[in-house]
Amino acid sequence: MNNIVVSVVMPAYCCRNTIRKAVESVFAQEMGSLGEVELIIVDDCSPEPFQDVIADYLKDSRLIYIRNEKNQGVAASRNRGIAVAKGRYIAFLDSDDWWLPGKLKCQLERLRTDQTVLCSTGRQLRTFEGKDMGRYIPVKEYVTYRDLLTHNSIACSSVMVRKDVIEEFPMEHDECHEDYITWLLILRKYGKASGINQPYLQYRMSKNSKSGNKLKSAKMTFLVYRHMGYGLVKSCLCFCSYAIHGVKKYMG
């Protein structure tokens, strides 16, 4: 493990029924001559043990397991994983989602070709049980700051980002969409992100998640605009655009 190029950060909490598929999808990634991949699981003091489900993977030298002494939330857990990562690039994967083969290699090649700092992919929506919902959410070839203000087209579990950049803009504000704030801050400085319009991310819909509860998600999105420093009027305009795109995105 002397040539780690991508570190995958996976926060884990009450994920016994889903984490094995997520872990398997990481180790199914083939990088060829581009380098090695490591997986960092940050157990956010989960009351539900899951280590036995991935016991065979815990013996793998490519996996680093960390347990928080107390529940810190997903933002702090991701930041803790980033802090110990050895790769030049960070990829995020939640413990209830999974990837299709080829994702990391394709993203790494795209980042190097485009010379951008962040790359996301399209996502296939799944029920929490893993059934295909027949809904695919695409991503543009390039996503600008202005694009991102109108709606968050960047799914966290699809992201690969340069480590130095994510360290510059660590995730904060668990009370709203912490990842959305980070993407906005990154694109406000670096201009644009690359997008690969393929369903490399298989995304589970959960009613208990931030995105699953639509009313809660809407309130948190409005808070994002306020955290970005926008006044009430501009925040409302951005939110209206978000709401329209949200209906199109999830309702078809």
Image (tube, helix red, strand yellow):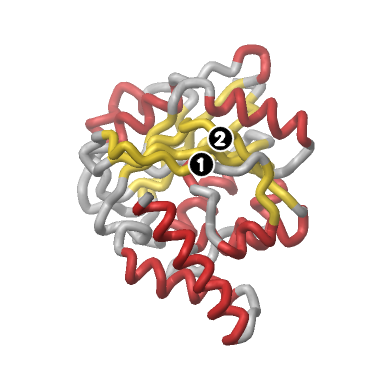
In the displayed structure, 240 sits above or below 37; it is below
Image coordinates of residue 252 in percent, x first then y, are 38, 49
Q: Quadrant of residue 150?
A: bottom right
User: In the visual, does 170 lie left or right of 212?
Assistant: right
In the displayed structure, 139 sits above or below 242; it is above
User: Tag 1's secondary structure?
Assistant: loop
Asked if marks 2 and 1 touch (Cβ < 8 Å), the reply is yes
Circle 2 crowding by C-alpha within 10 Å: few under 14, some 14–19, many from 20: some
Question: In this view of the protein, can residue 58 be seen by the observer?
Answer: yes
Residue carrying label 2: 197
Residue carrying label 1: 138
Image coordinates of residue 81 in percent, x first then y, are 52, 46
Image coordinates of residue 41 in percent, x first then y, are 42, 40
Q: Residue at x 64, y 80 (%)?
A: 230
Circle 1 crowding by C-alpha within 10 Å: few under 14, some 14–19, many from 20: some
Q: Residue furthest bottom?
A: 232
Q: Residue at x 56, y 35 (%)?
A: 197
In the picture, the disc for residue 218 is: none
Instruction: Please state which amino acid type lies under the numbered disc 1.
Output: Pro
